[in-house]
Image (cartoon, grey):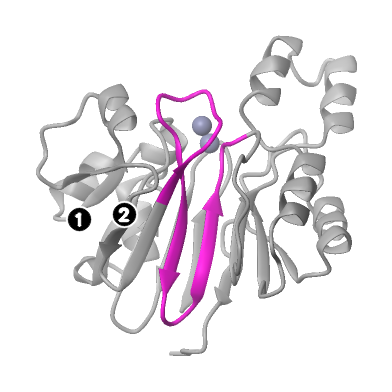
Amino acid sequence: MKLKILASGSSGNCYLLENETEILIIEAGISFKRIQEGINFNIGKVAGCLVTHEHKDHSKAMMDLMKNGIDVYTSKGTIEALGINDSYRLKQLIAHETVKVGGFTILPFDTQHDAAEPLGFLIQHKNMGKLLFITDSYFCKYKFKGLDHILVECNYKKEILEDNIDTGKFPELLRDRIIKSHFELENVKEFLKSSDLSMTKNIILIHMSSQNSDKELFKKEIARATGRPVFIGAKGLELYIGQEIF
Ligand SMILES: [Zn+2]
Ligand SMILES: [Zn+2]
């Protein structure tokens, strides 16, 4: 299984899990054209697309994907917030109810974000084991066991945010929104430390703030806190995350 990141962050998100026969798209927050390029125009290989919530940086290409024959899976709240519930390609996810998408088994769970009904995903596949995907959540109330791979938002560091507000580089008005909607470095550390990492092979940090983060520092601090290999999950990252190499 290969993980490929087409985009990550507030200007767009799209992540691919690809093996010899299938592609699972996670998030549709870039143009359909960029997704097509990312999958080498192999639309027939796509098993489906998961979308966490309605914000444009996660949902932008949903309509285009459905028009092109791809099933999109998301929550009822997200569907209602977007007002696009008329496509038979739209599949409603319910937190804690497992669904099969091709060879992938998906367990959605609720996350904490300023959106209607945001979700995170626990994704299982025989080629990669268990992968946790959690973004746009300032906190996670669940603890996970036996995770092989973790994609987790690491949006900002409190001190960097405060410095940017003090120096006028970041609007003070947005402080509360960030704090109540995105994962802060120390909170990510606590969350990871509370999870069982004994099986974890990769931790990939995603959705970093362009202003209030420090990639290398985040990578170093999460590696120190967890003792696991850590990657910066930015556009262009390609990583083999399973035994099957193709
Ligand atoms: Zn976002
Ligand atoms: Zn969001």
Report which residue position mark 1 lands on: 70
Q: Nearer the viewer, residue 62 or 196?
A: 196
Q: CA distance from mark 1 to mark 2?
A: 7 Å
Q: Position of residue 173 (x, y in %)?
A: 70, 9
Q: Are marks 1 and 2 in contact (CB under 8 Å)?
A: yes
- Image spot of residue 102 (x, y percent): 25, 69
Q: Amino acid at mark 2?
A: Cys
- Picture disc at residue 181: none
Q: Is residue 160 left or right of residue 48?
A: right
Label annotation for residue 49: 2
Of callouts 1 and 2, the N-terminal one:
2
Instruction: Report the magenta residues as a range.
Output: 108-137
Q: Classify 10 Å Cα crowding around label 2: few (below 14), some (14-19), many (20 and above).
A: many
Q: Would you say 191 lies left or right of 62 here?
A: right
Q: Nearer the viewer, residue 66 or 222?
A: 222
| Residue 154 showing in the rendered view | yes
